[in-house]
């Protein structure tokens, strides 16, 4: 994989060309100050101070009365440190608010390559649905997977010269409440030949896919030939499509071949063999029974809290809880 292959998969690069066969999207170039805010982990977790009175979340988090509870005095004669002021991005917020309205009032966000799917658990809905700047900032700031976009996008490139892209973009994509996860598929292209199709949501068995598999394969193959093959310049890549209820395919995303892209119901070795052994035949895989489910490809909670080993999130939490319990037992007047 080369840098140019990775760059072509950035949404601001491919969306203008495939706009007629994709979902409605508005793209904003992010100011460097906001990028620095996303990568900064040196201080406390702070959401940007919203300029809109409609956003209750940042108003609640940054309530001065609440913040007093978190100020720690160094001693009787020392002055308490003032809490850091939350950042503010008024121009970006206004632009995003306008885009949300344009897209029907609800969007899901992604950066150049990735969406913050790993932080959906922190939202009030448990999804990527956002209706305000503060909700978008919360998802982006809480995501570990976006560190890839911000710091490691070119790590697998054989001709790596860049540490990061020159600019970062925020894509706001129209939210569809009728979206069916079983109708999303990942397509694998090798040597400009479609060699594999995989059900995208591999953690669930959908019986309807067994009935529709042949029709879906034909539809996706025709869509690739007519709309993708001659327009996407890379030799090797993957793309995700969504099949609507009325039988139309919509491009959701492009990703590089290999590296950090999940092969889902395949292995990368199998996909290489498909090209070498059988030409012009597409291997279409779906979860065909409850036994075929593959859990663990994505989680709804941070990885730190799945790990219980030394240094993990749970380990640190339990240590703090035990320390606090011991202090309470030693405090005067506790009845011990």
Image (cartoon, helix red, strand yellow):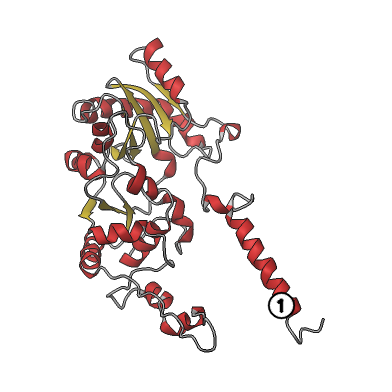
Q: Residue at x 38, y 77 (%)?
A: 59
- In depth, the one of 43 and 303 nearer the eye is 43
- In depth, the one of 89 and 284 nearer the eye is 89
Quick one: SS at disc 1?
helix
Find the residue positioned furthest to the bottom: 77
Q: Residue at x 24, y 25 (%)?
A: 225
Is residue 103 in view? no
Q: Residue at x 73, y 72 (%)?
A: 326
The local crowd at label 1, few if under 14, some if 14 to 19, many if 20 or more residues have their Cα within 10 Å, is: few
- In depth, the one of 63 and 103 nearer the eye is 63
Q: Quadrant of the N terminus?
A: top left
In the image, is residue 253 above or below residue 30? above
Give x and y (percent) for residue 90.
Answer: 23, 70
Q: Quadrant of the C terminus?
A: bottom right
Is residue 63 in view? yes
Give x and y (percent) for residue 189.
Answer: 32, 25
Find the residue positioned furthest to the top: 277
Residue 172 sits in quarter? bottom left
Lateral position of residue 23 relative to residue 16, left or right: right
Q: According to the image, label 1 marks what residue?
A: 328
Q: Residue at x 45, y 55 (%)?
A: 119
Give x and y (percent) for residue 6.
Answer: 28, 35
Give x and y (percent) for residue 152.
Answer: 36, 42
Residue 55 sits in quarter? bottom left
Find the residue positioned furthest to the right: 336
């Amino acid at each position: 994989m080369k840098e140019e292959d990775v760059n072509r998969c950035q949404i601001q690069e491919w969306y203008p060309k495939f706009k007629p066969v994709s979902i409605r999207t508005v793209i904003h170039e992010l100011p460097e100050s906001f990028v620095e805010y996303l990568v900064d982990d040196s201080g406390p977790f702070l959401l940007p101070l919203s300029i809109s009175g409609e956003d209750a979340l940042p108003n609640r988090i940054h309530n001065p009365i609440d913040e007093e509870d978190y100020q720690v005095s160094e001693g009787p004669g020392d002055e308490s440190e003032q809490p850091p002021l939350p950042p503010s991005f008024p121009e970006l917020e206004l632009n995003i608010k306008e885009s949300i309205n344009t897209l029907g009032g609800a969007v899901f966000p992604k950066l150049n390559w990735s969406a913050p799917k790993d932080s959906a658990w922190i939202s009030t809905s448990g999804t990527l649905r956002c209706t305000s700047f503060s909700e978008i900032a919360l998802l982006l700031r809480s995501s570990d997977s976006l560190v890839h976009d911000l710091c490691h996008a070119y790590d697998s490139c054989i001709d790596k010269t860049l540490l990061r892209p020159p600019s970062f973009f925020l894509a706001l994509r129209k939210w569809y409440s009728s979206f069916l996860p079983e109708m999303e598929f990942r397509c694998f292209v090798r040597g400009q030949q479609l060699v594999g199709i995989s059900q995208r949501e591999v953690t669930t068995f959908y019986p309807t896919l067994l009935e529709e598999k042949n029709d879906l394969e034909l539809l996706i193959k025709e869509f690739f030939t007519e709309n993708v093959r001659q327009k996407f310049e890379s030799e090797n890549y993957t793309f995700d499509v969504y099949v609507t209820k009325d039988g139309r395919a919509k491009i959701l995303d492009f990703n590089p071949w290999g590296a950090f892209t999940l092969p889902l119901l395949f292995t990368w070795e199998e996909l290489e063999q498909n090209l070498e052994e059988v030409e012009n035949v597409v291997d279409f895989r779906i979860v065909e029974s409850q036994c075929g489910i593959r859990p663990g490809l994505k989680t709804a909670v941070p990885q730190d809290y799945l790990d219980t080993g030394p240094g993990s999130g749970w380990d640190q939490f339990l240590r703090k809880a035990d320390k606090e319990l011991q202090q309470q037992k030693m405090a005067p007047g506790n009845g011990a």
